[in-house]
Image (cartoon, rainbow, N blue to C red):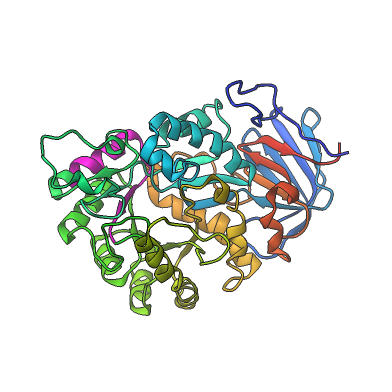
């Protein structure tokens, strides 16, 4: 009979929350076929020994842990915990109406409750690319909340009239003596214009605890005052973002859809371009030459399409999604480094489809390529944060000696059937993060 195993500690303020199982210093997982995050061939009939929060041994040889916990995988497939490289801890679970009628406390509570749901879909690590998840991350790391590892970008930075300038129409012209808009003052997003302001705001975000810096350097979909084709921020401003990030030994990622904006960002030293659905072959080749990542999402005009109240955003959404197929195909042919992310925004129900977005990659990638992208490839992207990377004790996105014990046990073989990932609640029998079991439905 299957059962869930919960921890001794309990988060009393979150009704029904899943807590972690207390574990001894060693856990042995036996009788599993291991996808190590790197190689297509499974390590068959393997055993994985975990000591503390790290993987100590992966071997087909028999092992024993006299005082430890033994979990029999029953021939299932063990894969690394999934990584979402374009996630919004707070935006994903906050309805758009909250941005108009709510406050930062509501946003934080929704994000904290949603973080547990993210982990229970198998995402053990996220690169948060915009918002204010700092307290949520701190409490997760301290064991006070349940959720994934978070590499926070902090509030994304926009120019006046750029993507993420969601202020009401009447907000301009602005008096320099006016106080900041509420969401800027509370770090959900920020605005910077001119090199001195860019330097100041970037330093402020790093002071908040950011792992990397997120900016909007081109037009966006869910914003009214910036057409898709515009290039946002001047060359001098872009270089200032990059230089300040470099002084902190980290990097800049930029929201961009179009060629002109992308090429300016690449030349300024930006290392990760987010979205990019309208990039040409010329831009993609420039990315490969400069070792720039394409962090694109399989966003299509399908059952998971974003819905907008205004026709302007709807038209821009259709324009962008028309380019999704082409950019994946070209980027793969050219050999650009591609990251996997989902970019869930303002809809808690859509956030539940997070793992389904992996299956949307099937037209362009094999199951092995998809799994590698969402594990070891994404982990490689996160390493651009250098010493600002908050998780450096072990490796992420792989099942190898010395890696973090972030693991998922799948009922079936996703290398043969990637659709298994679309139903994490039904097909993920074990979820472990940092050596702690958060879900276990194996036979006792």
Q: Can residue 34 be seen in this view?
A: yes
* Residue at image location 46% in from the left, 30% down from the top: 138
- Asked if residue 69 lies in the magenta stretch, the reply is no
- Image quarter where the C terminus lies is top right
Q: Is residue 38 visible?
A: no
Residue 94, percent across and down?
47, 41
Residue 308, percent across and down?
43, 57
Total marks shown come to 0
- Asked if residue 205 lies in the magenta stretch, the reply is yes
Q: Give the vertical position of 246 relative to 305 (above or below).
A: above
Q: In this view, does 79 lie to the left or right of 185?
A: right
Q: Nearer the viewer, residue 420 or 269?
A: 420
Q: In this view, does 86 lie to the left or right of 271?
A: right
Query: What segment carries the magenta color?
Result: 198-218
* Residue at image location 41% in from the left, 68% down from the top: 320
User: In the orientation shown, which residue stands out farthest toward the right?
Assistant: 1
Q: Where, by quadrant of the figure, is residue 311 drawn?
A: bottom left
């Amino acid at each position: 009979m299957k059962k869930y195993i919960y921890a001794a500690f309990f988060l009393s303020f979150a009704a029904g929350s899943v807590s972690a199982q207390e574990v001894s210093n060693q856990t042995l997982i036996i009788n599993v076929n291991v996808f190590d995050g790197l190689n297509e061939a499974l390590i068959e009939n393997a055993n994985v020994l975990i000591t503390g929060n790290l993987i100590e041994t992966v071997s087909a040889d028999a092992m024993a842990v006299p005082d430890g916990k033994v979990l029999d995988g029953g021939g299932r497939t063990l894969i690394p915990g999934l990584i979402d490289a374009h996630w919004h801890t707070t935006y994903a679970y906050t309805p758009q109406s909250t941005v108009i009628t709510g406050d930062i406390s509501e946003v934080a509570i929704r994000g904290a409750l949603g973080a547990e749901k993210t982990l229970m879909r198998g995402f053990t690590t996220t690169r948060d690319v915009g918002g204010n998840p700092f307290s949520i991350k701190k409490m997760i790391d301290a064991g006070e909340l349940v959720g994934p590892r978070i590499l926070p970008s902090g509030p994304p930075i926009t120019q006046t009239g750029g993507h993420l300038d969601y202020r009401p129409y009447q907000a301009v012209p602005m008096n320099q003596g006016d106080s900041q808009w509420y969401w800027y003052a509370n770090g959900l997003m920020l605005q910077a214009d001119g090199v001195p302001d860019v330097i100041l705001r970037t330093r402020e975000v790093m002071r908040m605890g950011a792992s990397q810096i997120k900016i909007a350097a081109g037009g966006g979909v869910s914003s009214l005052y910036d057409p898709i084709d515009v290039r946002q921020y001047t060359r001098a401003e872009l270089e200032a973002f990059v230089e300040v990030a470099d002084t902190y030994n980290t990097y800049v990622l930029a929201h961009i859809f179009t060629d002109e904006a992308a090429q300016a960002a690449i030349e300024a030293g930006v290392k990760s371009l987010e979205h990019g659905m309208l990039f040409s072959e010329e831009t993609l080749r420039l990315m490969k030459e400069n070792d720039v990542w394409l962090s694109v999402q399989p966003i299509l005009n399908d059952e998971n399409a974003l819905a907008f109240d205004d026709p302007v955003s709807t038209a821009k959404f259709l324009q962008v999604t028309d380019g999704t197929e082409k950019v994946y195909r070209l980027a793969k042919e050219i050999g650009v480094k591609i990251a996997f992310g989902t970019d869930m925004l303002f809809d808690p129900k859509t956030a539940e489809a997070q793992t389904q977005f992996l299956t949307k990659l099937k037209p362009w990638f094999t199951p092995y390529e998809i799994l590698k992208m969402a594990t070891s490839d994404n982990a490689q992207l996160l390493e651009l944060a250098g010493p600002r990377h908050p998780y450096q004790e072990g490796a992420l996105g792989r099942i190898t000696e010395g890696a973090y014990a972030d693991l998922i046990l799948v009922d079936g073989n996703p290398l043969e059937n990637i659709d298994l990932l679309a139903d994490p609640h039904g097909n993920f029998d074990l979820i472990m993060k940092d050596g702690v079991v958060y879900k276990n439905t194996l036979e006792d």
